[in-house]
Image (cartoon, rainbow, N blue to C red):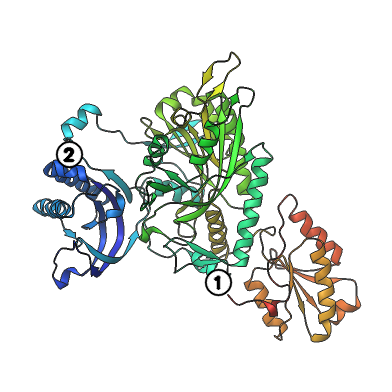
Amino acid sequence: MRILLIHSDHLKYQTKSKTRIAEEIDDEKKKGQFENALVVFTAVEKEDEENPVAVVENAVKEIMDVSGKVKAENIVIYPYAHLSSSLGAPNAAKEILTNLESELLARDLPVSRVPFGWYKSFEVSCKGHPLSELSRSITSESAEEKEEESPDEEESQFYMLKDGELLDTENYSYQNRDLKKLVDYELGRGESTGDEPPHVKLMREKKLADYEPSADVGHLRWYPKGRLIRDLLSDYVYTLVTDRGAMPVETPIMYDLADDAIRVHAEKFGERQYRMGGGKKDLMLRFAACFGAFRILADSFLTWKNLPVGIYELSTYSFRLEKKGEVVGLKRLRGFTMPDLHTVCADLEQSLQEFEGQIEMCKKTGEDLDVNYEVIFRATADFMEENREWINKAAAMIGKPVLMEILPKRKHYWICKMDFAAIDALGRPIENPTIQIDVESGERFGITYIDSEEHEHHPLILHCSPTGSIERVICSLLEKSALDMKEKVPMLPVWLAPTQVRVIPIAERHMEYANKIAQQIKDAHIRVDVDDRPETVGKKIRNAGGEWASYVIVIGDREMEGSELTVNVRETGQKVSMGIQELIDVIKLETEGMPFRPLPLPMDISRRVNF
């Protein structure tokens, strides 16, 4: 049995039509709504039929344990076949689910079961704390047998790491909102408001992106301005990693799960895989660029002289089957663009050196994007004990206290990772850059290198996304802008602003000169447009502000007669007199070292499509 446990603010469902295996139900069961509910999405598998009583018993224990921890007021069993590709027979599944409901009811728990075999619409609002999304595989194995194989799993320990000292998170004196919010979220102390993040409204209002109703949920349509920002960010990461020696590659988006290495690596991701059936192969859409990168490396001849060596792919797209109720705006999608860097290292010493370089790279992205990152440093207890001096050194590179998670033992492919997170306007983390030391994939995928004595070894591999997904970068920028609105005007960094300069002619007689000025600016590789619409100057200026234009020039008689322009600077709110070349120089200095792409829209605003 596969279950996905979602602690939700609410669950709503409505039956639409029955399948041939649907159970008969009363009208009152055709729809339902539950508040503060632990929703147990459940798939009954073939092997459950061998000992259904034991499977139900173990499922009850798991559900009771989680329900007690999250303090849910309702438990809802929701049949969900998409969690498994090895489903049990319909009649057996119905019987097991009915028995599961009965056993929970017998323990005086507030449990309900959603009808089996019906097409349904549903809406679930995930609370968003660390225990709000848990996946489990339930077998018939008894608790005693499990204890013999592995004693009760210890929980991670969390500390604040400051100046090489581990401090208690409860009594720590937090100096900023973002770090406190991150700690509260990681420790399950944060509360979900259920509100929509502000960036969703902004991405629509600024005509960047929107949901695509004709696609699966969690897939977006991108308008020209949004596509421009995505492309600029992609160019930015490309330069960032290639300047550090990484080699760009491109690999397929789907993989055969009959490949043992791919199947095992995919299983570590759990149930959130996009599976593709119907053919001779059981295929999966990639959730990162790991599979293709590892296959390239496995087929390459590597020696100690090559290492460390990095290969980079902008995975357009990667896919994760996030639950419908969890998908929101740019923060959590089913299809997204992930910059993925994999660096092959000879040994741990080389891995740690590379890790330090990648910390600097990830820090730089925060500086270049003007986004504050708070950091979670995660390591196994063994790694922590053996490399404490290096842990302190790496944490000190952040330049401020970090949250330290110590795992009692390794349960992932990594032994150490560092996660950088921006905090949204609602106080929730947005996962951005990450660095991980992978100790499994080299051997699993058959990646080897030859050392100086011609001996063959499996390398360690660093996974790094210097920014996190491109969509989450834009999410972070918009959420920061939403916070900025309380104190100052919101804006994007000038190198990312679709309109860097807006030229506004006061009257028709100023149009020719306005176009001449705009052409000079365009020739200097600066994105510029002209508001040639028959509107009042005041309205044009307000529109420029609504579109977050970095600089606005109003052209009237005085500007045509003199050599100086009056420039409205968005960042400061000041009006500054300067010549055209001086303005160009200011923008060039402000965007120095950043990528440029031309404006993908007509320069005259009157000719633009209203998306």
**Location of residue 583 (image quadrant):** bottom right
Of circles 2 and 1, the one toward us is 2
Residue 209, how many percent across, how many down?
A: 54, 66
The residue at which mark 1 appears reads as: 205
User: Which comes before the other along the chain, label 2 or label 1?
Assistant: 2
Furthest toward the front, the residue is 280
Q: Residue at x 24, y 52 (%)?
A: 42
Within 10 angstroms of label 2, few (less than 14), some, or many (20 or more) residues? some
In the image, 111: left or right of 222?
left
Q: Quadrant of the C terminus?
A: bottom right
The residue at which mark 2 appears reads as: 140
**Residue 490 in view, yes or no:** no
Within 10 angstroms of label 1, few (less than 14), some, or many (20 or more) residues? few
Position of residue 27 relative to residue 389, above or below, is below
- Please name the amino acid that badge 2 sits on: Ser
Mark identifier at residue 75: none
